[in-house]
Image: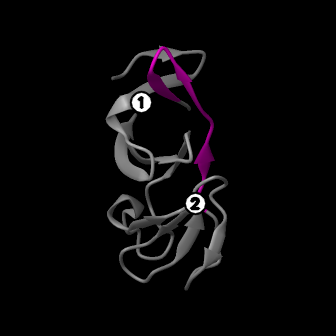
Amino acid sequence: MTDTVDNFVAVAAAADLPDGTMRCVPIERERVLLAHVAGRFYALRDMCGHRNAPLSRGRLIGTIVECPLHFAQFDVTTGRLVDGPISADVPSYETKVEAGVVLVRR
């Protein structure tokens, strides 16, 4: 999916990402982590600032995504660092769902 409307990019069918799961979606040469938590969708840059590990290969525990390399933890609702060996948050992106399609603002 690559349609763009008002700086929102269609990235996935909402039905394809069950609640409590996450996956990587590419947007304009960037890896974006898309997470579905408690009925809402969240998007973060899919890269931990410590060694550039793909967060989408980590674990999603409630609203926390854990880096697969050194276990840094980020809140998927805000991108804020919760715990770990780095001091930087991860950029987050606005999301919305229209007609069963998840869109991310770029």
For the record, the magenta segment spans 90-103
| Mark 1 surroundings within 10 Å by alpha-carbon count, few (fewer than 14), some (14 through 19), many (20 or more) | some
Question: Which color mode does the image show?
Answer: one colour
Residue 17 versus residue 102 in the image, above or below: below
Side of 17 relative to 83 (left or right): left
Q: For residue 29, say whether it is visible.
A: no
For the C terminus, the quadrant is top right
Query: Circle 1 sits in a helix, a strand or a loop, which is it?
Result: helix
Residue 102 position in % (x across, y down): 47, 28
Compared to residue 42, the image places residue 5 above or below, namely: above
Instruction: Look at mark 2 in the image and give the residue it sits on.
Output: 63
Residue at figure coordinates x 64%, y 70% from the top left: 81
The local crowd at label 2, few if under 14, some if 14 to 19, many if 20 or more residues have their Cα within 10 Å, is: some
Residue 60, label in figure:
none
Q: CA distance from mark 2 to mark 1?
A: 18 Å
x then y, percent, for residue 69: 36, 79
| Main SS, magenta residues | strand
Q: Earlier in the sequence, mark 2 or mark 1?
A: 1
Q: Amino acid at mark 2?
A: Thr
Quarter-wise, where is residue 78 in the image?
Answer: bottom right
106 or 23: nearer the eye? 23
Which of these two is toward me, 36 or 52? 36
* Quadrant including the N terminus: top left
Where is residue 34? Give x, y as percent: 45, 45
Q: Amino acid at mark 1?
A: Ala
Relative horizontal placement of residue 100, taking residue 37 as reference (left or right): left
- Residue highlighted by disc 1: 14
